[in-house]
Image (cartoon, rainbow, N blue to C red):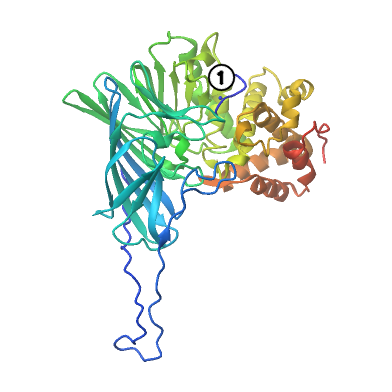
């Protein structure tokens, strides 16, 4: 999430390398051993992959023509010089016959590219890296691209949503942001519709910690530098990747066979932040009772202190929190929100950004469920409070179609959460929680849309729910209070 209601605003896997394409035969002469009537080999037409996935809000985000299965990202960062060098290996499968394909890469300079071990030509078109292999890539075949690059990484400027991406800090760096950030430190198909597994090797000066997603793979040191390894094997959307470098208080452990890794910047006094993220596994255990099995391979959280980051983000398996969430006292509500995203937003990811309420509405509702669980207030009370006090702008902004500028609006979060509660009232508790668990199970590790959710809710409940969802997601006025159907 870019912001919650609490915020100021919120080893390498098996290589499957495909054969390089040979140009088709144009001759109509029969092949040896075949009758003259045998059909000739069809000619393939190779075309350039699209420079975007065609997302209604961000048409140029991501790229077309291929599907990534794994990234291996190896970077070395020198904070004193603000210099990053890296090599990223992209394992993918062509989904059309490609003469070239694009990767998103912002600012950094590319020195070499290979595809299946052969040198490939490359050009830049703003924040697009255009790669032309020595031979065309055949639809359905796997291929491996390796890109070597370096430079001073910079954040991305997004007029509607603010900066996101690589930020140089006083003791290291933070790479974080939504809806885009990954392309500021490695070449990537930067859209959540193309999820992949990730391996990270991050080399930094001795004395600094380098934190990323997933399962820690240990560290090695040589010549004044330490390499930290991380692996995220559950398919992950690119904006959920993170890199945090600096000095931290680290707490590690194991829970239900999964590693726990928590980190709090040493610039924040020990106290509320430490105790709050220490509740991560307790929160996750409760959420399992309402959402189903925990869907990723690690637990944890990272607390940072930087004036440019006033939000929390559900970076997979290890959310990153602004220290301001814990300024006055402990805050497990924000932990509940970010941990709920491990189900809704991470495991079940967006097929398009327009449907972001599926992420934020469920994560907001998880806060209400957690408060209900801890006897602070009920979900019904949270709903009633917002129904009475929601801003006029939130009612005018439909959470199911908020516009690019409204992705992180009050409507998406609070009216999104109210939509979830309206469904609960309409179908009753037993059916509601069956819907939620079925959604998380059937869409695990995949992507989905609002239409997918409505269809599943109607299938499980046996009720017609179009009117309910139309009112709560798409009307530009306050809906009537929900009633049991």
Q: Position of residue 135 (x, y in %)?
A: 31, 61
Quarter of the rendering occupied by the C terminus: top right
429 shown above or below 100: above
In the image: residue 94, left or right of residue 280: left
What residue is shown at x 77% (from left), y 25% (from top)?
Answer: 387
Quarter of the rendering occupied by the N terminus: top right
In the image: residue 411, left or right of residue 210: right
In the image: residue 112, left or right of residue 318: left
Nearer to us in this view, 42 or 237? 42
Q: Position of residue 339 (x, y in %)?
A: 53, 29
What residue is shown at x 24% (from left), y 54% (from top)?
Answer: 117
Total marks placed: 1
Q: Position of residue 475 (x, y in %)?
A: 77, 37
Q: Residues within 10 Å of mark 1 (few under 14, many from 20)?
A: many
275 shown above or below 395: above
Q: Position of residue 171 (x, y in %)?
A: 33, 17
Would residue 145 be seen by someone viewing this image from the given angle? yes
Q: Quadrant of residue 362?
A: top right
Nearer to us in this view, 319 or 139? 139
Q: Residue furthest left?
A: 223
Q: Residue furthest bottom?
A: 36
Residue, disc 1: 332
Q: Quadrant of residue 183?
A: top left
Would residue 465 be seen by someone viewing this image from the given angle? no
The local secondary structure at tag 1 comes to helix
What residue is shown at x 55% (from left), y 37% (from top)?
Answer: 345
Nearer to us in this view, 209 or 253? 209
């Amino acid at each position: 999430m870019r912001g919650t209601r609490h915020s100021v605003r919120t080893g390498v896997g098996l290589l499957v390398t495909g054969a390089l394409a040979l140009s088709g035969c144009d001759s109509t002469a029969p092949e040896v051993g075949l009758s003259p009537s045998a059909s000739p080999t069809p000619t393939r037409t190779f075309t350039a992959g699209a420079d975007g996935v065609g997302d209604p809000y961000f048409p140029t985000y991501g790229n077309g023509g291929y599907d990534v299965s794994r990234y291996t990202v190896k970077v070395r960062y020198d904070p004193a010089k603000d210099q990053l060098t890296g090599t990223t290996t992209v394992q993918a499968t062509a989904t059309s016959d490609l003469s070239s394909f694009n990767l998103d890469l912002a600012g950094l300079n590319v020195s070499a590219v290979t595809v299946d071990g052969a040198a490939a030509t490359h050009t830049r078109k703003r924040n697009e890296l255009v790669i032309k292999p020595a031979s065309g890539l055949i639809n359905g075949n796997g291929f491996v691209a390796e890109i070597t690059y370096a430079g001073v990484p910079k954040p991305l400027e997004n007029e509607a949503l603010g900066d996101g991406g690589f930020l140089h800090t006083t003791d290291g760096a933070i790479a974080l942001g939504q809806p885009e950030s990954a392309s500021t430190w490695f070449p990537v198909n930067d859209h959540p519709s193309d999820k992949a597994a990730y391996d990270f090797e991050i080399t930094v000066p001795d004395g600094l910690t380098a934190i990323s997603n997933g399962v820690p793979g240990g560290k090695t040191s040589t010549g004044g530098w330490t390499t930290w390894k991380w692996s995220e094997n559950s398919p992950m959307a690119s904006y959920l990747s993170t890199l945090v470098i600096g000095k931290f208080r680290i707490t590690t452990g194991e829970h239900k066979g999964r590693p726990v890794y928590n980190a709090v910047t040493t610039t924040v006094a020990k106290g509320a932040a430490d105790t709050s993220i220490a509740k991560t596994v307790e929160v996750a255990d409760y959420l399992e009772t309402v959402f189903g099995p925990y869907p990723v391979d690690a637990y944890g959280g990272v607390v940072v202190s930087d004036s440019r980051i006033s939000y929390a983000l559900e970076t997979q398996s290890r959310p990153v929190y602004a220290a301001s969430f814990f300024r006055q006292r402990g805050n497990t509500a924000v932990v509940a929100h970010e941990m709920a995203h491990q189900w809704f937003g991470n495991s079940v990811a967006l097929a398009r950004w327009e449907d972001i309420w599926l992420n934020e509405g469920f994560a907001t509702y998880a806060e209400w469920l957690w408060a209900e669980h801890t006897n602070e207030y009920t979900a019904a009370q949270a709903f009633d409070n917002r129904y009475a006090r929601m801003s006029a702008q939130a009612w005018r902004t439909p959470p199911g179609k908020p516009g690019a500028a409204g992705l992180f609006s009050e409507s998406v979060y609070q009216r999104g959460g109210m939509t979830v509660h309206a469904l609960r009232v309409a179908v009753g508790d037993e059916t509601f929680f069956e819907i939620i668990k079925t959604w998380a199970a059937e869409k695990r590790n995949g992507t989905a849309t609002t239409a997918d959710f409505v269809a599943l809710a109607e299938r499980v409940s046996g009720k017609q729910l179009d009117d309910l969802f139309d009112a709560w997601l798409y009307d530009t006025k306050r809906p009537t209070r929900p009633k049991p159907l």
